[in-house]
Amino acid sequence: MVAEQLARTVIRMAHEIVERHHSLESLALIGVRTRGVPIAKRLSVALEKISGTSVPTGALDITLYRDDLMRYPVGPQPILRKTEIEFSIDDRRILLVDDVLYTGRTIRAALDALIDFGRPRSIELLVLVDRGHRELPIKADYVGKNVPTSLRESVQVRLMETEGQDEVVIEEDEPAS
Amino acid sequence: MSQQADSSLRDPTGPLVLGTTVGLRTKDLLGIGDLSSEEILLILDTAEAMKEVGTRPIKKVPALRGRTVVNLFFEPSTRTRMSFEIAEKRLSADTLNMTASGLSVVKGETLVDTVRNLGAMAPDLIIVRHASAGAGHVVARLCSAGVINAGDGMHEHPTQALLDALTIRQHKGRFDGLKVSIIGDLLHSRVFRSNLLLLQKLGADVCACAPTTLMLSGMNRFGVRSTTSVDEAVDGADVIMLLRIQLERMRGHFIPSLREYFQRFGMTTDRLRLAKPDVIIMHPGPLNRGVEIASEVADGPYSVILEQVANGVAVRMAVLYLLAGGHQG
């Protein structure tokens, strides 16, 4: 997926969101760190253009909720980044935003984390790419693109805000030696 | 923020395949002397992220679930012990508290035996405070658990220096070229030693001020300016750190009287006039009001003493989190 397609996909998903919600008043976008955050911000801009409503965005770091944190007794820890949710999520409709949906474990952690912030009216999930291979019963409500992959491949989403360019590519993982 | 974390990245050689991973090079945090400036910045960045947990309606995350942390305090402590305990609880660790009065040491057990027995119960992390320098090192050698030094005699108190650094960074945004004056009982202070090491690693210009009797011998070898004049120390200072007169550690006569100390070295509003207009006043606590600091200064507009306490929890959460990953090498 190149920059142009990625931009169109974001606009399309924004239209889908408007279509499914009567009003965007109680909606809030929460991006999962790292790349869910810029995607959520772009969606918010698109939503404002379409509907005239400004939708607040937040950033969620799920590191402290990972299910593999304590799995390895020895090893380095994932980098912890800041969670920034500057509004109450109580009774809001939350749209969780991430770049790639794979095993579903990140989203499981994100749901646990969100619940610690309050009791939203609902939580929906939006992903730019769904690559399959789910290990948990989790399904996205909005999908930018379904990309069937093999387990040996990895899906790389690169964004202007984080990597300096917009693209989605599938890379073959180097075989384990 | 995130760029600073990125710059301190090591090779992601660990077992976690997804995402980027980091860790300290050692299983223990025994002193600032063992840390690189990158590791210090990693701890500060992690602490910034941990601060947010304390602002949530539910101030608890599951990161250290199922881990056992022992707080082994052979010396009295209020702030440090409570701060560690809150940090452990916010990370969902199981905590055990042992203070000197409740330990078998009162029945004559040695530190070595106490720790061997403790080690047999397989805790994951041990926080240790002891009146002897190097006690943390002894504990770390004796058991496989990660050890955090919460103050060993007159040697080091690394988490205090880290929380001080976090407080300074939040106010000044930098360390390079910052004039930090540390005034008080330098001789008996582990806080001074840890802060000196840390601030020098990060490029601050440290000035140490004390009566000659409370100065360290061979201060020049530390590469630090030292003076017995408070006015000289305060002049142009960005940060003033006051240290407690530790009467309980003084064997002999170091100062004529507390009153005279206050007159010569105590921080008053009047003395502060020489400092930078945006100076911050720090103190590791507990305060001796009217000895090293006047109440008007401790409770005044430049004081960040309570912010230090708040940052202590975040820094300890960061250290616990980073060490819970274990040893990399």
Image (tube, helix red, strand yellow):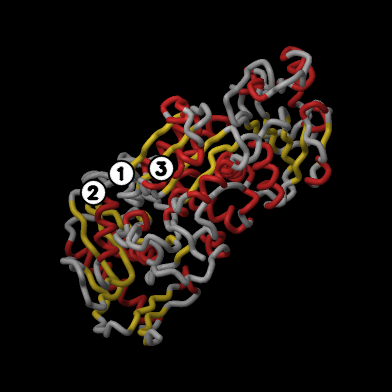
Q: CA distance from mark 3 to mark 1?
A: 44 Å
Both marks 2 and 1 on one chain: yes
The type of residue carrying mark 3 is Leu
The type of residue carrying mark 1 is Ser
Of B24 and A167, the residue lying toward us: B24
Q: Quadrant of residue B116?
A: top left
On screen, residue B150 above or below A9: above
Q: Residue at x 73, y 12 (%)?
A: B259
Q: Quadrant of residue B274?
A: top right
The tag on residue A92 is 2
Q: Quadrant of residue A106?
A: bottom left
On screen, residue A158 above or below B214: below
In-image side of A23 versus B257 (left or right): left
Query: Where's the N terminus of chain A, which quadrant?
Result: bottom left
Q: Chain of mark 1?
A: A
Q: Residue at x 78, y 14 (%)?
A: B256
Q: Residues within 10 Å of mark 2 (few under 14, many from 20)?
A: some
Q: Residues within 10 Å of mark 1 (few under 14, many from 20)?
A: few
Q: Residues within 10 Å of mark 3 (few under 14, many from 20)?
A: some
The tag on residue A88 is 1
Marks 2,1: beta carbons within 8 A: yes
Marks 2,3: beta carbons within 8 A: no
Q: Residue at x 63, y 32 (%)?
A: B282
Q: Position of residue B89 (x, y in %)?
A: 36, 40
Both marks 2 and 3 on one chain: no
Task: Look at the numbered disc 1 and give the secondary structure of its residue.
Answer: loop
Q: Chain of mark 3?
A: B
The residue indicated by pointer 3 is B118
